[in-house]
Image (cartoon, coloured by chain):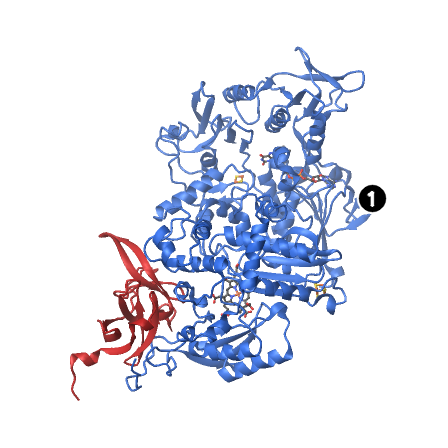
Chain colours: A red, B blue
Amino acid sequence: MTVDTQTTFEAVCRLDQIEREGGVAALVGGVAVAVIRTFDDEVYALSNFDPFSKASVLARGIVGTKTVRSDDGEEVVPFVASPMFKQAFDLRDGTCLDDPDNGDVAVPTYDVRVIDGVVEVGPRRS
Amino acid sequence: MAPHLRKQLVVVGHGMVGHRFVESAISRGLTETYDITVLGEEPRPAYDRVALTSYFEVGAEALGFLPSGAYDDPRVTLRLDTEVVAISPRQRIVTLASGEDLHYDELVMATGAAPFVPPVPGADLDNVFVYRTIEDLDAIRTASKKSKVGAVIGGGLLGLEAANALHQLGLETHVVELAPRLMAVQIDDLGGRTLNQHINKLGLTVHTGAMTEAILADKKGRVERLALKDRNPLEVDIVVFSAGIRPRDALARAAGLDVADRGGVLVDESLRSSDEHIWAIGECAAVQGTMYGLVAPGYDMAEIVVDRLLGGAGEFTGADMSTKLKLLGVDVASFGDAHGATEGALELTYQDAVSGVYKKLVISEDGKRLLGGVLVGDAAAYGILRPMVASGMELPENPEELILPASRGGLEMDLPDDMQVCSCNDVTKAQIKDAVSDGSTLNDGSPCTDAACVTAHTRAGSTCGSCKTVVKKIVEDFFTAAGREVDKSLCQHFRMTRQELFDVVAVHGYTRFDDIVEAHGSGRGCDICKPAVASILASLLNQHVLDPGNRQLQDTNDAYLGNLQKNGTYSVVPRIPGGEITPDKLIVIGQVAQEFGLYTKITGGQRIDLFGARMEDLPAIWKRLVDAGMESGHAYGKSLRTVKSCVGSTWCRYGVQDSVGLAIELELRYRGLRSPHKLKGGVSGCARECAEARSKDFGIIATDKGWNLYVCGNGGAIPSHAQLLAGDLDKETLIRYLDRFLMYYIRTADRLQRTSYWMDSVDGGLDRIREVVVDDVLGLGAELEAAMDRHVESYFDEWKATIEDPEKMARFVSFVNAPGTPDPNISFREERGQVQAAVNDGPVSLGTTIPVGAP
Ligand code: SRM
Ligand SMILES: Cc1cc2nc3c(=O)[nH]c(=O)nc-3n(C[C@H](O)[C@H](O)[C@H](O)COP(=O)(O)OP(=O)(O)OC[C@H]3O[C@@H](n4cnc5c(N)ncnc54)[C@H](O)[C@@H]3O)c2cc1C
Ligand code: SF4
Ligand code: FES
C-alpha cells in the first residue's frame, strides 16, 4: 500500500450539497465531522460533538458572524451555534466564543479543501 | 381534610392591607389549612387608596387590585357591601349587618382608619365631605359641579392632596391649617414656608395658624361660609375635612378587646390582640400603642400575621415613616428624623429662594450617618437618601454633595447591596440586581432587561412609586458595569426591536433574510436574529420553513420539524386537535412507535409525544402518520401548540356549550401560525374550568349566553392567569376578537415574549389591548382579521410538504457521505419497558473499517 499526502484528505460531498450558512455531518475516519459552508463560500470542518451537551449535533446549528471585541480591536468571526444550548464556536479554530467559565473549551477542527467542486476533509489539526 | 373540618379564618375589612394579607395567605400556602372569608364594607374590592387622588384621571378600574372581584383561590370567599357589626370573642362569631353570624377560628381585623372630623358646628351639613374612599371622591365631584369655592380643613399630607383634587375640579381652593405651617408633622418651618410658596403658585390659598370655628349655612341649609377665629370668614360652597385619621377600633372596643390610649386595637409585636384568636393589621392596629398611618407598615403586619398563622415567629419592630407628597409639580419629602430630634444631631441645609428649593439633612453627631431630612421643591434625592437612613450606611466625605443641585456633583454613589430600595415592598438593591442578572426571572429563561420588568417582578416601585428613579438607576448601572448597553436591539446585527423589524419587513415587503440583513443589519446574523426573522417571514408569508433560504434561519427544532432531545434524536408530535382522537389513529401511533422503537408519553398538552426518533427516520415516521390522516403538531415551533378542551356539553352533565367542538375549530384555525413565542389555548364547557383555559394565552370558558374570552395567561415558571377580555360572546365575535388579538400580539410583541409579558409591556396593559381588539380604536381590526384570513387560507401541513419534496428530504440523513450508517453517537438505555435517551462522555468512533461511499 502506498501512502501519499493526498489520501489523508477524504472527499465527503459536493460543495452544492451544503447550503450556504448550513452544514452537513460527514463520517471521516469513523468519527462525525461537521462540515460547514459560510455565506462567502468558505468551508470549515470541526468535530460534530458538542462538548457542552455531549451530543453529536454541531452540523445542525445556525451559522452566522459575530463581532468579537478583544484587546487587539474588533474582529468579525464566522461561527456556528450549537443547536442544543446555543454556545457559539469559532469556525476557524473551534474555540468557544461564549464559554461561561472563560476556560479554553474548543472543539477539534480539521483541514478542509474544495477541489473541482468536491469538499475534502483532511487530518485533524492539533 | 373534609371541608367542614377545615379551619375558618375571617378577615374584617377589604382595604389595602386586608387585600395584601389574603394575597400573601394564598401565595404562602395558608389556604391549604384555612378557608378564608373576607368581609368588606365598601361596595368594591380593595383598591389603591394611596393613589386615590388619581381617581378623577384614571377611573376606578385602574385603581382596583382585584378587577375580577374574586381571588383565584377557591378557598377564599370575598363578600363586599358586607359590614361587620359585632364580634363575640367568647363564641368566636362575627355578626354582619344583615344579622347573619359567621364562625371563625382566627379573626384578622383590617378595618383601617376613618377621617377625623372635629366637632365643629355645621360639620354635618350637606356639601361637607371627607377624603378616604372612591365614594367620597364621587360625592365631591358631583358637588363640585354646582360650586365655585372649596376649602380643605387640614394642611397635612392628605389635606394637600385633597386640596389639589378640588383645584383640579376647577374650584378656587383654600387650605386651612391650624398649625403655623403646612405638613407640620413631616417638615420644619423653613421647609413649610418654601412649600407655601409652591402651593400658592399652584393657585391655592393657604391659611396657616387658622382655626375653624364653624361652618355656616345659607337659608336652604347649604354651606355658605367658614368662620375662622380672629380672621375674616371665607365664602365657600364645599368643605373637605382632612384633619387626621382615627383607627377604626369601635368593633374591638365593643367586643371588650384592649385598645390603645390614643385609639387603635392594641396588639403586641406579633400583632395579636388581647384575645389570642384575634389579630389586627394596618391602620386599625396600634402596635404596642403606636398606630401607623402608612401602607408599608400595614403590608409588613399582614406578612407577619400570615407567618404567625403558619407557625412562624415574625415580629413587627417599627417602621420607616418617610413620606413623599404626590402633588403634581411640587416635590416634598420627609424621611427619618426630619426634625433633628436625635441628641447631638447636626443639620445641613441648602436653600434657593428663587427656585423655591429647600433641602435639609439631619446628620449624626459624629458626622458619619444620615438620620433624616426634608426636601422641598426638589425631591429627586429622596429615593437614595431615604434608604441611606434605613440602612445606616456611612456618609460620603462631603455629605453636602448629596443635597447640592445635581449639576454640581449630585447623586453618584455606590449603595450597598443589602440596602432596602423600595420600602413599600421591602425590596433590596441585591434583589433588583438579581432580577436583571438571574436567568430564572422570566419564563423564557432570561433575566429582565429593563426597569419596568424589574418592577413587575419584584414589586419595587409599584406602590408609591417614589423609588422608581433609583430602581431605574440601579438597573442602568448594572448594565453599564456589565458592559452591556441598555438598548432594545434584537442582537448585534439588528439595532432595532422585533416590533420595529417586523414593521420594516412588512413595509418593504421583504421575503429573504439576505435582503433584510443587507439593508437594515450588519454581518451575517446569528442564532438570535435569524430565527426572529424566520418567524416574522412565516407570520407574514406562511411559506414552508424549510424552503431554501428559510431553513438556515430556523431554530434547532424548526430546522428539522421536531424537538431536539438530549442525545441528538428528535421527538414526534402529531396534532390531536382539542385532544380528540379516533381509535384508528391511536392504533397507528402505537404501531409507528413500535416499529421505530420510540418512547411514548401522553403530554401535558393532551396529545402523544413519540421520543427518540433518529433524524434520518423522521420522514418515514411522518409518512406513516400523514398517510393515516395526521399532520404536524408544531410542538417544535414558536407557533400554536394545542387548544386544550374539556369534554363539555356533549357528555358532561354540567357543560353548557360544546367545548370540544370549539377547541378543535380554533386549533385548526390557528394551526401553523408562527408567533413571537409559543401560543396555547383552552376551552372549558362551563365555569368549573376543567380545561384550565385560564392558564393559556387565550382561554375560553362557556357561559349560558355564549363564551367568555380570557387572554394572556400562561403556566411555566411564573404562572399567570388569563384576564377577561370580553364576555358572553357569540362564536363569530369570539373568533373575530381572537383573530385580532393574536395578530396584534404577533405584530407588536418582542422576541420570545409570551402574551402575559407582552401585556405588561403594552402601555395601558389589558385595557389598551381591549381598546384595540374590542373597541378597534386604532381602526386596525379589519386589517388584522384579513391577515389572519390569509394565514388560514394558506395553511398547509409542513410535514406532508416535506416528505413530498425530494430536495427537502435530502437533508434528513445521518451522514452526507454515509447515509446508510446510523450515528454511533446516539445511545439509549431501557427503563420500564421503553427506551430512554443516554449520553456519551465523548465522541464515539466507528473506526476506519466502515466503507464510506463516494460523493
Ligand atoms: C412534551 C411536554 C411535556 C410532557 O411530557 O407533557 C413538554 C416538553 C417541552 N416543553 Fe413544555 N411541554 C409540554 C407541555 C407544557 C405545558 C402544559 C400545557 O401545554 O398545558 C406547559 C405549561 C403551560 C404553558 O406553556 O404556559 C409547558 C411549559 C413550558 C415552558 C415554559 C413556558 C413559559 O412561558 O414559561 C417551556 C420553555 C419555553 O417554551 O421557553 C417549555 C419547553 C418545552 C420543551 C420544548 C423544551 C425544549 O426546548 O426541549 C420540551 C420539549 C418537548 C419535546 O421534546 O417534544 N414548556 N410545557 C408537553 C408537550 C405539550 C404538547 O403536547 O405540545
Ligand atoms: C388620599 C390618601 C392618600 C394616601 N397616600 C399615602 C401615601 O402616599 N403613602 C402611604 O403609605 N399611605 C398613604 N395613604 C394611607 C393608606 O391609604 C393607608 O395606610 C392604607 O390604606 C391602610 O390600609 P388598611 O387596609 O389598614 O385600611 P383601608 O385601606 O382603609 O381598608 C380598611 C377597609 O376596611 C373596611 N371596614 C372598616 N370597618 C369595617 C367593618 N366593620 N366591616 C367591614 N369592613 C370594614 C373599610 O371600608 C375599608 O375598605 C393615603 C390615604 C389616603 C386616603
Ligand atoms: S369544565 Fe364544566 S363542562 Fe367541562 S368537563 Fe369540567 S364540569 Fe364538565
Ligand atoms: S418605596 Fe413605595 S413603591 Fe417603592
Q: Residue at x 69, y 64 (%)?
A: B659
| Relative height, residue B204 to residue B669 (above, below) | above
Q: Position of residue B401 (x, y in %)?
A: 38, 29
* Residue B116 visible, this orientation: no
In the picture, the quarter occupied by the C terminus of chain B is: bottom left
Give neighbour class at mark 1: few <14, some 14-19, many 20+ (Cα, 10 Å).
few
In the picture, the quarter occupied by the N terminus of chain B is: bottom right
Q: Left or right of B689: which side holds B669?
A: left
Q: Which residue is mark 1?
A: B98
- Callout 1: chain: B
Q: Position of residue B391 (x, y in %)?
A: 46, 40
Amino acid carrying mark 1 in the image: Ser
* Residue B49 visible, this orientation: yes
Q: Position of residue A61 (x, y in %)?
A: 37, 66
Q: Left or right of B283: which side holds B615?
A: left
Q: Nearer the viewer, residue B284 or B329?
A: B329
Q: Position of residue B97 (x, y in %)?
A: 81, 42
Residue extending furthest right?
B99
Residue extending furthest bottom?
A1
Q: Residue at x 33, y 66 (%)?
A: A20
Q: Left or right of B68: which side holds A124?
A: left
Secondary structure under the numbered disc 1 in the rendered image: loop
